[in-house]
Image (tube, rainbow, N blue to C red):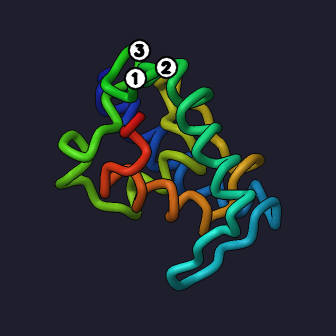
Amino acid sequence: MSFPARAVFLWIAAAAVAPAALGDVAPRTTGDVTPDAARRSELVNLVRQDCGSCHGMTLKGGLGPALTRESLRDKPPGSLAAAILYGRPGTPMPPWRAFVSSSEADWIVRQLQEGTLDER
């Protein structure tokens, strides 16, 4: 199996088993759940500081790609939330499921795609 094919296979395999392996670390919720004000503040700080350490402190790119409204405009929200929760195998992108719930990942994606988190 060639390197790109193997990387794709490993990513698909990891995505398939990750939810079962992680158990109930952060249960999946449905709907448009908005965190309370204190948690929103924590999540904004997490994105700007922790995500910003790789994606650039202004979220315009660095080791990781830009997380601006323009760069994320055409990306499927579910795929972006999955990248936050489970990371991206074969890349430096780590999983954040231990720190954010599924609904919080969805909220982060909405904020990034609306451009509210890349404004300083």
Q: Residue furthest front?
A: 120
Q: Name the residue under label 2.
A: 54
Classify 16 as above or below 28: above
Instruction: Give left or right: position of 32 versus 2.
Output: right
Q: Dots 3 and 1: beta carbons under 8 Å?
A: yes
Q: Residue 17 placed where, x, y %?
A: 63, 56
Q: Distance between the residues labelled 3 and 1?
A: 4 Å
Q: Residue 94 placed where, x, y %?
A: 60, 32
Q: For residue 110, which quarter of the picture?
A: bottom left
Name the image quarter holding the N terminus. top left
Of mark 2 and mark 1, the one earlier in the sequence is: 2
Q: Dots 2 and 1: beta carbons under 8 Å?
A: yes
Residue 63 image label: 3
Q: Name the residue under label 1.
A: 64
Secondary structure of the residue carrying tag 3 is: loop
Which residue does the image show at 70% across and 69% down from the upper left? 36
Q: Residue 26 placed where, x, y %?
A: 76, 63
Q: Residue 2 placed where, x, y %?
A: 30, 23
Secondary structure of the residue carrying tag 2 is: helix
Q: Dots 3 and 2: beta carbons under 8 Å?
A: yes
Crowd band around label 2 with a 10 angstrom C-alpha radius: few (<14), some (14–19), many (20+): some
Q: For residue 39, which quarter of the picture?
A: bottom right
Crowd band around label 3 with a 10 angstrom C-alpha radius: few (<14), some (14–19), many (20+): few
Which residue does the image show at 61% across and 28% down from the upper left? 50
Q: Please, what is the three-letter code of the amino acid marked with disc 1?
A: Gly
Q: Which of 59 and 93 is in front in this view?
A: 59
Secondary structure of the residue carrying tag 1 is: loop
Q: How far apart are marks 3 and 2 (CA)?
A: 5 Å
Which residue does the image show at 63% across and 38% down from the upper left? 45
Residue 81 image label: none
Q: For residue 30, which quarter of the picture?
A: bottom right
